[in-house]
Amino acid sequence: MATATATEGQKGVLGWIERTGNRLPDPVFIFFYLILGLVAVSVAASLFGYSAPHPTLKAEGSNEAYIIQATSLLSPENIQRLWVEMPATFTHFHPLGYVLVVMLGAGVAERTGLFGTAMRAGVRNAPIFLLTPMVALAAMLGNLAADAAYVVLIPLAGVLFAAAGRHPVAGIAAAFAGVSGGFSANLLPGQLDALLFGITEEAAEALVPAWDANIAGNWYFIAAMTFLFLPAIWYVTDRIVEPRLGAYAPDGPAGEMIKDGDKPLTPAQKKGLMRALYAGLAVCALWVFFTVGPGTPLIDEDAPNPEARLTPFYRSLVAGFFILFLAAGWAYGKVAGTVQGHRDVVRMMSEAMGDLAYYLVLAFAAAHFVAMFNWSNLGLIFAVQGAAGIKASGLPMPITLGLLVLLTGLVNLFVGSASAKWALLAPVLVPMLMLLNVSPEMTTAAYRVGDSATNIITPLMVYFPLILTFCQRWNRDFGLGSLTATMIPYSIFLMLSGLTLVVIWVALGLPLGPAASVGYQLPAP
């Protein structure tokens, strides 16, 4: 009842955001309505001869630029393409294969208990003065575990803070800020990289069909985000949030939660973590062998330039993370007792695919929206004209990308899904910025900053009610407004930190990851 009352009584800007967002349909139907609108716009654009010169192609038999014409989605060719190619449109959607493969392994690592135990081991023995940064760091690294970080680490952080004599809601807030506010920050690429770069590849290929995604293309950037966000979360927790919450004295059920949640790891769990570490190192060694060993199967010796030689290696990382998570999870489970045989592993992989049921439905809708956007040529035309407008404005590129960060943060208040937002924005933003010599990797990095910072202040975020429930275990009067007010300082500091990082990164032209730079040069016509 406390949640409902808080929701109904919410006023002001946050109340308007909540009410407006609650009226939005499910993201699947948002794509459906967008497709209907896209059809109408494509018909009108075709009738009025909407067009733009292609930036890289020449007209046949001429030195003049090829003219991109808007195409009606109700033309006989496009109607035929929609119905005949529907299975291929869905199955060839790049993010689909990336996510399914990585999740087969991650599902095993999650269900054996590896992710949860590793997070507990990472934070439970931290000194009191280092508790906040350890929780925040474990939370950001916990993004590799996807949902497990929300359901395991965040309530555990409350228990650990209470056991240390600190306010448990401050621990929950710090963990929530790390898991969700630092959603893209990590020391390693993972599932999110596979998902986002699949969409980026789809968008970039509309302009340059030969462009290939590298899921390590933001590796250095997201690692820098981790080290930048860590002190921001630490400062906000210890200097702003916890003093505001005041002292906490556990009693009754709260005291029992501390006893239950602060139990040490069992010998089997500790041994399982070591076996998982050995398995992970073995997989890494195997990939090194494939890269530098005899025959170098993950090196393209015939590539025209040094950067392209490692393309097979980068494209193999999706499979690499699948094998890494599978091997580590299986090794942990055999020792910890959560895996009795190979049938358990198969069952866990099947359950992981079951968890992706909603994503498959969303991917079906997003795949058709992206494909039809490309068939209409509207994405390319918008990109060409948008690039010309930005160029004419004279805005420095760091400022342009900073505005992209703010735009993404605003959209994130209404559309919570990272993949849904990027599927909406990428078809225009990626080609548009490629025309301005900004790499798809840099555009993706800027998007990730904006997508992370406002996750923690919108009630439309799918885990927001769950976090509220965790807080109410310790304070029954803690409402929706209380949680939002607690998280707003984190959102502000993370947004400012992320904006600063984007501006500095672009200004200095630092590499974003292996063979991934800020700039991009379109291929010669």
Image (tube, grey):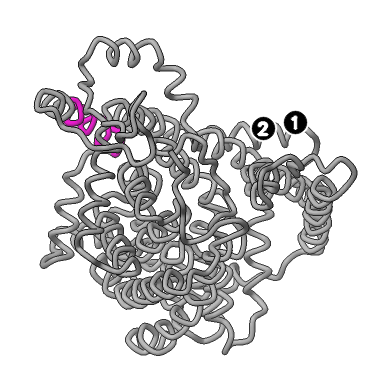
Residue 166 image point, x, y percent: 48, 85
33 in the magenta segment: yes
Three-letter amino acid code at disc 1? Arg
70 in the magenta segment: no
Give whichever of 302, 447 is nearer the camera. 302
Residue 321 visible somewhere in the drawing = no
Quadrant of the rendered image containing residue 61: top left
Q: Are marks 2 and 1 in contact (CB under 8 Å)?
A: yes
Above-or-below relation of 514 to 41 = below
- Which residue is pictured at 64% across the width and 74% down the height? 124
Indicate the quadrant containing the C terminus: top left, top right, bottom left or bottom right: top left
Determine the main secondary structure of the stretch shown in magenta: helix
Compared across the picture, whether 118 is left or right of 238 comes to: right
Residue 276 image point, x, y percent: 78, 55
- Which residue is pictured at 34% across the width and 84% down the height? 245
Indicate the quadrant containing the N terminus: top left, top right, bottom left or bottom right: bottom left
Three-letter amino acid code at disc 2? Arg
SS at badge 2: helix
Give whichever of 373, 102 is nearer the camera. 373
Extreme residue in the front direction: 62
Q: Identify the residue under disc 1.
A: 343
The residue stretch that appears in magenta: 27-39
Residue 445 image point, x, y percent: 44, 59
Compared across the picture, whether 185 is left or right of 281 comes to: left
Residue 164 visible somewhere in the drawing = yes
Q: Identify the residue under disc 2.
A: 347
Quadrant of the rendered image containing residue 340: top right
